[in-house]
Image (tube, grey):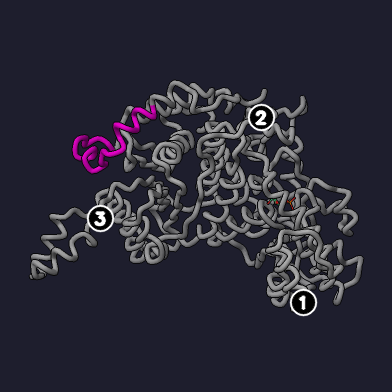
Amino acid sequence: MALSTLNPTKTASWKKLEKHFEELKNVSMQEMFKQDATRAEKFSILWNDFLIDYSKNIINKETIALLLELANEMGLKSGIEDYFGGGIINQTENRAVLHTALRAKESEVINVNGVNVIPEVYEVKNKIKAFTNEVTSGKRTGYTGKAFTDVVNIGIGGSDLGPAMVVEALQYYKNDLNVHFVSNVDGDHVNEIIKKLNPETTLFVIVSKTFTTQETLTNSETIRKWFLQSASQEDVAKHFVAVSTNLQKVTEFGINPDNVFPMWDWVGGRFSLWSAVGLSISLAVGFDNFEELLNGANEMDEHFKTADFDRNIPVVLALLSVWYNNFFGAESEALIPYTQYLQKLAPYLQQGTMESNGKSVGRDGKEVDYQTGTIIWGEPGTNAQHAFFQLIHQGTKLIPTDFIGYVQPLYGDNNHHDKLMSNFFAQTEALLNGKEEAKVQAEFDKKGLSAEAAAFLLPFKVFAGNKPTNTFLIQKLTPKSLGSLISLYEHKIFVQGFIWNIFSYDQWGVELGKQLANSILDEINSNEVKNHDSSTASLLSHFLRNK
Ligand code: F6P
């Protein structure tokens, strides 16, 4: 079934939310906390080893009730059923959206065009397992019989960001293989990686759903050329494997069909780390940990599918995002993990969120007249505090922020961890409460500041507070909890796009640049600048004259 095509702003609940916003926009969270000692309890969800506290938002019970009414009026329940049930919800590409099938239990039946995809999913999973075990045990070797020491993932976008983020996040669980990522078509990127490698002991995983992506093919060709300086053509089969839907192109590249890990058109690139696209994850942390990652995602899938909307983490977080985006006019959301391991989470979710929901045409084919996709950005705390937190605290923009922290550190270093976490708690409290005039004045008095100096400094030292945050307090960073966390954000993206009445699973906007780059490359190769606007033409001419 196709998703509904209702314009959210035309619903009765949207009108009520507009009215409600007028009543709430100047209410401070500090006041609401003072008036209700049970606020944290009311607005938090405890699920598995996650505590999600969303009480530090500019909301009251009515806000949540109206947002849930909006979700219901839009038909979210049946949208979720279509999403999980293999409905063709990526209508502009005529595809189902089933990354959730990649982590489903073997006993499940999920049909795409009448065929159950689960047996195929498990066949590929078993292939990943066998391959991983052969490489990590040293049974599978390079062309001189030596065990592999390095793995290079060659891919871009969804064929890079997910595996790169997870391999970094699960470093603690890693084996001895060094895993590298080559993505940019910038030759300096690939050359910097190659120079660290020994061709005899390096395995290359080419990841491209389409196997037509310029960056990935160029990098793969450069690497193959470099490899052939020391090895022979037959050795390519031992050192290069591919993950793709395009078997023909992969074979043309010289990859042994046995070394091809298939994927399916119902897995979008930016949601594909659960498929064989995650082969480098499995190689880095072992198949059991990879499977745990999938299990964690599956548990979040079940929660999303079955929990009532008012206790449903992805639903609540997505609705809060709609609240700020469409009523408060917030443009971006910051994501601050208090663990260095998650330093690539924001770039990963930038693709997930912005490629999915950066759309301006509704599912009814009409241009939308309201805001859609949020801008995602962030860095780990505490580094972020010393970089851009000033703007979140005292700038003019409203930036709802997710704080992600863990109860337990991985190395058990409580000295560090307690300091890290005291910052985590302090920041959300500071963003909530700010610093009122009386407090600032009391500090001045204590310091014995002159009345004149105090009057001058006062406005700069007062913080308004009332800045919304969500706090994710998770027991420990494990493959399983990471899987749940990623899945949570995937479903948040679905709900946002669903409410905004857009198609979240295509990416036509990225295609135009790709086409133009190809035709400009022809001009560069023939040293001839064709028809362009005067700016592009003069830039190209300058480049050609001076290269
Ligand atoms: O950036 C556009 C995009 O199509 C992404 O959606 C995708 O993840 C990436 O390019 C790579 O595509 P492929 O896996 O086909 O090489």
Q: Is residue 57 left or right of residue 99?
A: left
Query: Which residue sits at x=71%, y=34%?
Result: 92
Task: Say which amino acid is labelled 2.
Answer: Glu
SS type, badge 1: helix
Q: Position of residue 143 (x, y in %)?
A: 84, 69
Pointer 1 local density, CA inside 10 Å: few below 14, some 14–19, many at least 20: few
Q: Nearer the viewer, mark 1 or mark 3?
A: 1
**Mark 1 CB lies closer than 8 A to ligand 1:** no
SS type, badge 2: loop
Q: Position of residue 113 (x, y in %)?
A: 77, 27
SS type, badge 3: loop
Query: Which residue sits at x=75%, y=40%?
Result: 265
Query: Which residue sits at x=59%, y=39%?
Result: 360
Residues in magenta, as a range? 17-39
Q: Is residue 415 left or right of residue 302?
A: left
Pointer 2 local density, CA inside 10 Å: few below 14, some 14–19, many at least 20: few
Q: Which residue is mark 1?
A: 545
Q: Which residue is mark 3?
A: 463
Q: Position of residue 354 (x, y in %)?
A: 57, 47
In primary-sequence order, the first of circles 2 and 3 is 2
Q: Which residue is mark 2?
A: 108
Quadrant of the drawing holding the N terminus = top right
* Main SS of residues in magenta: helix
Given residues 442 and 19, the one toward you in this image is 19
Residue farthest to the front, as pictured: 534
Q: Is residue 195 left or right of residue 228?
A: left
Given residues 497 and 133, the one toward you in this image is 497
Q: Position of residue 234 (x, y in %)?
A: 91, 65
Q: Is residue 224 visible?
A: no
Task: Say which amino acid is labelled 1.
Answer: Arg
Quadrant of the drawing holding the C terminus = bottom right
